[in-house]
Image: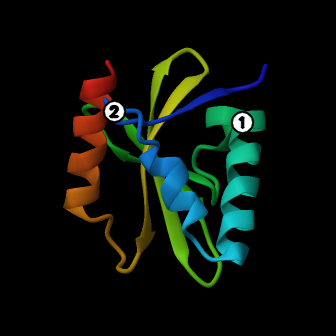
Amino acid sequence: MLTKIYFYKTSSGKEIVINEINNLDSQSIVKTRNAIRLFEEYGLSLINTKWVKKIYKKPTLFELRITGNKQIRILFSEISSNKYLFTNIFVKKSRKTPTKEIETAVKRLNEFI
């Protein structure tokens, strides 16, 4: 069964995650889209692989990991069975996921619900 992915939109309809993906360099866009397709096909069965990692407990947040020249991360949460909300995307510059990015993901998830 295919996984359904929703991309966070502001109340005014601005597609922040999609826009950020489109603002990446062309190689990063291709890698990011491939990772999203892979997640659509396999969902959370990718957990604990190089692709998906659980990073936060309450609410449960995961990161889709895109590697290459840039370490790109998309934070997301399961909103119902096989349905996920991709809340934000960023280029990772240190070993730890920035607290600010986790806070943004939690805030957007709460807005969505």
- Residue 83: x and y, percent? 57, 22
Mark 2 — residue?
12
Is 62 above or below relative to 111? below
Residue at x-position 33% and y-position 24%: 112
Amino acid tagged 2? Ser
Mark 1 — residue?
40
Residue at x-position 66% and y-position 60%: 32
Picture colour scheme: rainbow
Mark in the foreground, 2 or 1: 2
Camera-nearest residue between 54 and 113: 113
Instruction: Pick the quarter of the image with the N terminus.
Output: top right
Residue 46 falls left or right of residue 92: right
* Residue 49 appears in view: yes
- Residue 61: x and y, percent? 38, 40
Residue at x-position 63% and y-position 55%: 51
- Residue 19: x and y, percent? 51, 55
Which quadrant would residue 105 be assigned to in this image?
A: top left
Residue at x-position 62% and y-position 85%: 69
Badge 2 density bin: few <14, some 14–19, many ≥20, Cα 10 Å: few
